[in-house]
Image: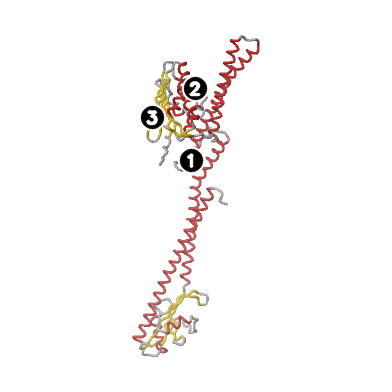
């Protein structure tokens, strides 16, 4: 029944208003009825006490049978209630309506009046609601009779019924207004949610250009902002992915074309020994290049899937850096670059040395690509606050400010002609984060770029 937000909100408002109005009106009616009943009872009790006091002071020396009519004449006209004078045995001596037939009264009510108390009783006589008050008539302290006042409560009940009808009309209007307010409020929530639902379905279907209009600056509005941002990011990633696929296809096709060309050349005729060596060397280089690209793709895919396992161990950082720099130094010399290392001895990290080496080689490879001949590439280390930071700085062309926030994200390729596949730095960032560290890039166009890799230091062993 209440399957939607709209129906639940309207139903909640309706039930809440119904319960509130019902409770308030019930308490109000009960209060009004009790108030009027208390007033009527007080008036009758005062009248009965006054008649009893008057009888005891001025009439009590006469027989009750002879004084009943006089008492009735003196007090019956003061109030609209029916008045009776009755003997202790229950005989009606006088009645303001002239009806001397006895009326049914509960025994307890009658005994209390005969015992000298002022007694009240509320009930029905001949199907009519009545209120009866009885008070003793005394002579020298002895009860010689009872004066009884009786009034119909039908006018009061009629007034209560009229009031109830008016309250029901007002309550119905209030409940309907509350339900209408609930419907209006529900629409302010449900309609944007329906718009968001349809937009999310379109986004899920691949329409990344859809945007959700924001009507209110509330939780629903912030949800719309989040989904719009998500769609923008998905669209950006989709564009980057398409550019990446196009670029990687080109990157793969280049070595394959070179390999295919040399294979055809070598097969067409008997090549000279020099051609054999040159062709095989190029095929070997291009095959290594293809293998490196495929391994990079596989590593990134495994990292994204969370299926890669680090083989961590305590690794002396200075030795690892010296090994990497020694490996990259011949290439730096061929490119006319100056590669320097400023290690700090005695620093140990708990890391996978092969993966860490992969990160450093990738960073140095990027620096080599963008640093012109005669430039310098530095590898520095600093330590403090439980972590070590490795900085790879170059004197390359730098990164434009608008591209800097995107460098290192998946599939991003810069405008520079030497930009790679778009997964190298992203792969480095993922590996560093798996080690509990972080990677930061600072760059100034025309000055150079510095990449910082921060890793937690290994905790020293405590022996005793």
Q: Quadrant of the C terminus?
A: top left
- Badge 3 marks a residue whose secondary structure is strand
User: Who is closer to the viewer here, 66 or 212?
Assistant: 212
x, y percentage for residue 295?
A: 55, 27
Q: For the point 46% across and 85% down, which residue is it?
A: 92
Instruction: Give the residue furthest to the front.
Output: 464
Q: Earlier in the sequence, mark 1 or mark 3?
A: 1
Residue 409 in view (yes/no)? no
Residue 312 lies left or right of residue 448; in this view the side is: right
C-alpha gap between disc 1 and disc 3: 43 Å
Q: Is residue 329 above or below residue 157?
A: above
Q: Which residue is mark 2?
A: 419
User: Badge 1: few (under 14), some or many (20 or more) residues near its Cα, within 10 Å?
Assistant: some
Q: Which residue is mark 3?
A: 382
Q: Which residue is mark 1?
A: 223
User: Badge 2: few (under 14), some or many (20 or more) residues near its Cα, within 10 Å?
Assistant: some
User: Who is closer to the viewer here, 171 or 93?
Assistant: 171
Q: Nearer the viewer, mark 1 or mark 3?
A: 3
Instruction: Give the residue furthest to the left.
Output: 57
Q: Circles 3 and 2: CB distance less than 8 Å?
A: no
C-alpha gap between disc 1 and disc 2: 36 Å
Residue 50 lies left or right of residue 313; in this view the side is: left
- Badge 1 marks a residue whose secondary structure is helix
x, y percentage for residue 342?
A: 39, 25
- Badge 2 marks a residue whose secondary structure is loop
User: Badge 3: few (under 14), some or many (20 or more) residues near its Cα, within 10 Å?
Assistant: some
- Quadrant of the image occupied by residue 399: top left
C-alpha gap between disc 3 and disc 2: 29 Å
Q: Is residue 196 above or below residue 327?
A: below
- Quadrant of the image occupied by residue 277: top right
């Amino acid at each position: 029944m209440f399957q939607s937000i709209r129906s639940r909100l309207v139903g909640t408002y309706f039930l809440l208003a119904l319960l509130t109005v019902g409770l308030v009106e019930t308490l109000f009616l009960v209060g009004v009825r009790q108030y009027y009943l208390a007033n009527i009872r007080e008036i009758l009790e005062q009248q009965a006490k006054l008649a009893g006091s008057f009888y005891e002071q001025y009439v009590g020396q006469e027989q009750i049978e002879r004084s009943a009519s006089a008492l009735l004449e003196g007090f019956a006209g003061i109030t609209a209630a029916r008045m009776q004078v009755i003997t202790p045995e229950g005989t009606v001596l006088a009645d303001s309506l002239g009806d001397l037939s006895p009326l049914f009264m509960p025994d307890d009510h009658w005994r209390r009046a005969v015992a000298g108390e002022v007694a009240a009783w509320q009930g029905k006589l001949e199907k009519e609601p009545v209120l009866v008050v009885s008070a003793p008539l005394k002579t020298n302290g002895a009860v010689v009779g009872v004066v009884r006042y009786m009034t119909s409560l039908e006018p009061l009940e009629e007034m209560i019924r009229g009031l109830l009808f008016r309250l029901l009309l007002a309550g119905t209007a209030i409940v309907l207004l509350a339900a209408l307010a609930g419907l209006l409020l529900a629409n302010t929530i449900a309609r944007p949610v329906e718009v968001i639902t349809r937009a999310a379905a379109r986004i899920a279907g691949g329409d990344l250009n859809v945007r959700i209009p924001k009507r209110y600056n509330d939780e629903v509005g912030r949800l719309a902002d989040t989904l719009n941002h998500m769609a923008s990011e998905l669209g950006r990633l989709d564009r980057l992915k398409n550019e990446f696929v196009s670029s990687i296809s080109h990157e793969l096709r280049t070595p394959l074309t070179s390999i295919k060309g040399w294979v055809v050349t070598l097969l067409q005729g008997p090549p000279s020994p020099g051609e054999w060596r040159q062709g095989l060397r190029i095929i070997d280089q291009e095959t290594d290049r293809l293998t490196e690209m495929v391994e990079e793709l596989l590593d990134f895919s495994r990292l994204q899937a969370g299926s890669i396992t680090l083989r961590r161990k305590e690794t002396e950082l200075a030795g690892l850096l010296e090994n990497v720099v020694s490996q990259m130094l011949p290439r730096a010399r061929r490119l006319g670059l100056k590669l320097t290392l400023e290690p700090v001895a005695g620093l140990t990290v708990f890391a996978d040395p092969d993966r860490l080496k992969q990160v450093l080689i990738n960073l140095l490879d990027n620096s080599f690509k963008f640093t012109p001949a005669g430039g310098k590439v530095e590898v520095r280390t600093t330590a403090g606050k439980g972590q070590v930071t490795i900085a790879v700085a170059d004197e390359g062309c730098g990164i434009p400010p608008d591209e800097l926030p995107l460098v290192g994200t998946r599939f991003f390729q810069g405008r520079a002609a030497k930009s790679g596949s778009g997964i190298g730095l992203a792969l480095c960032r993922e590996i560093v984060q798996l080690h509990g560290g972080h990677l930061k890039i600072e760059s100034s166009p025309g000055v150079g770029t510095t990449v910082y890799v921060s890793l937690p230091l290994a905790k020293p062993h405590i022996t005793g």
